Amino acid sequence: MPPPTDQHDGIADAVKAQLAAALAAAGVTIDCHAAEDLSKLVAVKTLPFVACVPVGPEQERADWTTNARDGIGFPVAAAYMTSGATDGEKSPAAGGMTMTQFRRLLWATFHNQRLASFTPECVCEVSSAGEIWDKDDPAHQKLQTVMIVTAAGRFPRGS
């Protein structure tokens, strides 16, 4: 039996692609990256950038379940990383955006919207992230804001 498909990584890649397109359409020049480990990304990438990182366990979504498919929600953190004072206001870099602008763009792009370029079809929900990373982690020192994009859909059993 082949190993199961990593749907979570695929969804993070699709969130990154859709967010990169939305940023470009808004005239914002910020690189987007999908990664499994934000700390490693912070060490090698130039600020500002956006990271799409799979977080937490997948969620059972009974409202999406059928007799042939499982309803599952896959949460992805969309983190806006930039420089500035720790836990203070960070000014947007050239070509960047403010924390509020980023959060509104995420909401408009994903909330109750279909996740483009991903099969099976998923619908996204956007929510606040709460505490995602340890405040002592070097990645946290560069964090401007983060929200969770959860892609919920019907996935074949055993895949």
Image (cartoon, rainbow, N blue to C red):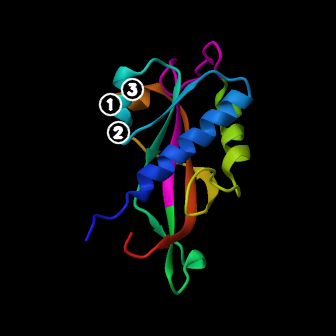
Magenta run includes residue 137: no
Secondary structure under the numbered disc 2 in the rendered image: loop
Query: CA separation, marks 3 and 2?
Result: 9 Å
Label 1: which residue? 40
Magenta run includes residue 81: yes
Q: Quadrant of the N terminus?
A: bottom left
Circles 3 and 1, Cβ within 8 Å, touching? The answer is: yes
Seen from this angle, which residue lies furthest front? 1
Looking at numbered disc 2 in the image, what kind of residue is underneath it? Asp
Q: Is residue 57 visible?
A: yes
Q: Closer to the N terminus: mark 3 or mark 2?
A: 2
Q: Residue at x 67, y 26 (%)?
A: 98
Vertical comparison of 87 with 16: above or below = above
Seen from this angle, which residue lies furthest left? 1
Label 2: which residue? 37
Nearest the viewer among 60 and 144 is 60
Secondary structure under the numbered disc 3 in the rendered image: helix
Looking at numbered disc 3 in the image, what kind of residue is underneath it? Val
Query: CA separation, marks 3 and 1?
Result: 5 Å
Label 3: which residue? 42
Taking 145 as reference, is 38 left or right?
Answer: left
Pinpoint residue 147: horizontal percent, then vertical percent.
Answer: 57, 45
Pinpoint residue 73: horizontal percent, then vertical percent.
Answer: 52, 64
Circles 3 and 2, Cβ within 8 Å, touching? The answer is: no
Part of the protein shown in magenta: 74-96
Taking 155 as reference, is 124 left or right?
Answer: right
